Image (cartoon, coloured by chain):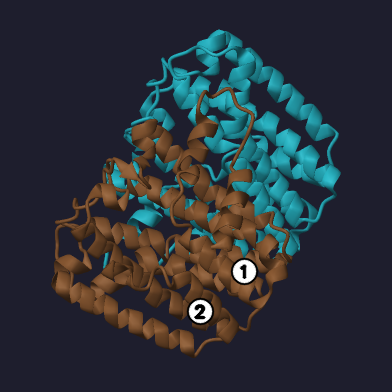
Chain colours: A cyan, B brown
């Protein structure tokens, strides 16, 4: 987990700072970024870069932080009273509980925009920076994460058929995970075919991750999970649609697909991802 | 006003569309963009480009739309119940009144991110696209617009001294206006000195614009202004700090500075901006 330590140390040194006479704006900007978390998306990006070209890892830190920042803004807004109304996140009070709702809206907005500032100012070729911004904005915005979130909220009390539930979660969760892998491939100057292969792998991985989250939400306490859980009976989750057994079977199947995809991938990248994902692929069984 | 017609037509043809089974996500994404408005920021950008290199105006439409999109997201979030709690905007119901609060949060988030998608995919040199993204994100995010908004909200019931009120409004309003002009200069490949000159001009213009808004809020009805007005007694406005007479005097002085800055600027750009700003510089006297 050396890459995680490197990223964590980069993040701590690159938290947003500014001169202001606002009493807690800077603290609020940093609060949820400091709160830890798995750093799953940046590690996916960095693992691909490390496998193909370790010398580029330092330049990849900034885009990796951008992905984490976009993800963090989405958590802050998802936790708002008007959405999930959650009190706990990453083992801490959610941002609107620690400060207030207005601060949570604005800090989320600022981190969303700042992700693109980080990419635009990374020490990478202009073409690469543009490609990274396009991927992050496509998958993290209108056509991706926000689309998934608005579907999730709108259909909260209506059971969706499996195909629509998959579309919901591909958008809500999987596309940003897929984009993280593809962004690593873009930085490492891998071929377009390899970029797309990693993107497709990421979609499966994201779906697995979501099903696992649903399983954990259904089976663990808030204390164990480090966030508000079991408030999701009404939500469109795979557990609610397929039952716990069905969701676990679905997760097992995705985990098998993912192993097969790793076997057909560039072997350096596959090895690096196997190391990283060892902790994740079977976590719904822990 | 040919440039406004061109931009309006480009915007109408480039509203966000997507395939979705959400009943009104696409409509909500388009709603506030369609609602009109002065298109002041995109026109500033386009006027600079037109003055220096009219052939580049078509390629500048996409970044101009990006600026309008970022501005529009900020209006949607500013109108939320937790901020200004406004019912009217651009002569229409605000987004959370037309749809609901959750939709307004998410649509704002999506438009924020999408501004950077538009820039990353513009038909411009990669270096130019990166410089545009950096300007927009710097001035529209943590270090600019959001900083101003959080200051405005936090100090809502505390009278700030003039210097702090200026810092608040330079961040809240002026920096995005300044960035719009500078982005035009970047697209038109003007020198760094000229870019900075336009940026500084934009800061003054933005302050003037804000003082004029305060004056209009204090003197016009909601119907005349096309948005909720006169709910600002508690707000840190120039009118509340300096009185109506004082604010008008301040606006007159800024208008004079602005005329002088125009006289010392590249004459093609100055002529174009004079045409555009004829309707604005003295609007607090209308």
Image coordinates for residue A191, horizontal then vertical, percent: 85, 49
- Residue pictured at 54% horizontal, 73% vertical: B182
Quick check: can you spot residue A31?
yes
Disc 1, SS: helix
Q: Quadrant of residue A144?
A: top right
Chain at tag 1: B
Quarter of the image for residue B249 reads bottom left
Give the camera-side residue of A206 and B230: B230
Residue A275 vertical placement versus B247 (above, below): above
Q: Chain of mark 2?
A: B
Q: Of residues A109 and B178, which is closer to you in this image?
A: B178
Q: Which residue is mark 1?
A: B131
Q: Kindly identify which residue carries mark 2.
A: B198
Q: CA distance from mark 1 to mark 2?
A: 15 Å
The spot of residue B203 in percent (x, y) is 41, 75
Q: Would residue B18 be found to the left or right of residue B146 on screen?
A: right
Question: On residue B15, which mark appears?
Answer: none
- Residue B85 falls left or right of residue B280: left
Q: Position of residue A259 (x, y in %)?
A: 76, 28
């Amino acid at each position: 987990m050396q890459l995680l330590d490197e990223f964590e140390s980069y993040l701590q040194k690159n938290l947003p700072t500014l001169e202001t006479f606002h009493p807690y704006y800077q603290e609020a900007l940093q609060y949820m970024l400091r709160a830890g978390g798995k750093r799953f998306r940046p590690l996916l990006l960095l693992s691909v870069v490390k496998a193909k070209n370790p010398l580029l890892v330092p330049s990849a830190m900034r885009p990796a932080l951008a992905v984490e920042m976009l993800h963090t803004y989405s958590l802050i807004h998802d936790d708002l009273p008007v959405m999930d109304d959650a009190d706990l996140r990453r083992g801490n009070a959610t941002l609107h509980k620690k400060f207030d709702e207005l601060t949570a809206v604005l800090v989320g907005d600022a981190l969303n925009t700042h992700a693109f500032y980080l990419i635009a100012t990374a020490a990478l070729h202009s073409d690469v920076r543009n490609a990274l911004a396009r991927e992050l904005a496509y998958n993290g915005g209108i056509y991706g994460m926000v689309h998934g979130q608005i579907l999730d909220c709108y259909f909260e009390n209506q059971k969706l058929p499996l195909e629509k539930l998959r579309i919901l979660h591909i958008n809500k969760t999987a596309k940003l995970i897929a984009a993280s892998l593809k962004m690593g491939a873009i930085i490492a100057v891998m071929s377009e075919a390899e970029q797309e292969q990693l993107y497709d792998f990421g979609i499966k991985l994201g779906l697995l991750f979501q099903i696992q989250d649903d399983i954990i939400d259904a089976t663990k306490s808030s204390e164990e999970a480090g966030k508000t859980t079991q408030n999701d009976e009404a939500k469109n989750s795979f557990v609610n649609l397929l039952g716990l057994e069905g969701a676990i079977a679905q997760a097992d199947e995705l985990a098998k697909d993912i192993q097969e995809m790793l076997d057909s991938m560039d072997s350096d990248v596959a090895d690096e991802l196997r190391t990283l994902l060892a902790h994740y692929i079977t976590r719904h069984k822990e």
